[in-house]
Amino acid sequence: MLNGDVLAKVASDTLNANFNSQSLEEGVVLLATREDDGSFAVRRVVQNQAVVNSALAAFATAGAEKAKAEELAKEQMAVEEQRAAARAALKVA
C-alpha cells in the first residue's frame, strides 16, 4: 500500500524536527486538518507501528468497501438494463 501513487510531498524543518530518525518503521501517520484555503496543515507526526498498522488496516477496509459498492452499482445497472430491455420488448409485442 505504501508503494502506490504519491498524493503529495511535504517537507519542512519543523516536520523533520518532529520525526524521530531512531524509529524508522514502515511508515508514519501524519495527522492533518484541511484549511479554508484548501491546503492541509500537518498537526502531528505519529511514529508508532500499531498506529501505522491500524491506519493501513482502515485503508484496506475502506478500499474493500469501495470495491463492494462499485460491484453492487454494476449489478444494479445490469438489472436496470434488463428491465429496460424487457419494457422495450413488451412495447414491440
Image: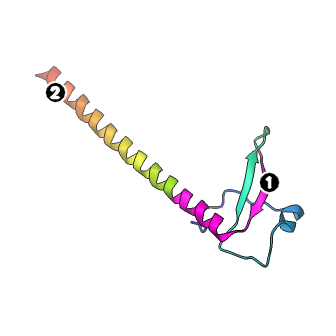
Front one among 90 and 62: 62
Q: SS class of the residue under badge 2?
A: helix
State which quadrant residue 81 falls in. Answer: top left
> Which label's residue is closer to the chain start, 1 or 2?
1
Question: Any magenta on residue 59?
Answer: yes
Residue at x 51%, y 53% (from the top left corner): 62
The answer to whether 35 is drawn above or below residue 54 in the figure is: above
Residue at x 73%, y 59% (from the top left corner): 30
Question: Any magenta on residue 40?
Answer: yes
Front one among 42 and 89: 42
Left or right of residue 41: residue 27: left
State which quadrant residue 20 falls in. Answer: bottom right
Q: Residues within 10 Å of mark 1 (few under 14, many from 20)?
A: few
Left or right of residue 90: residue 76: right
Left or right of residue 74: residue 88: left
- Residue 89 marker: 2
Residue span colored magenta? 39-60
* Amino acid type at mark 1: Arg
Q: Position of residue 84 (x, y in %)?
A: 25, 29
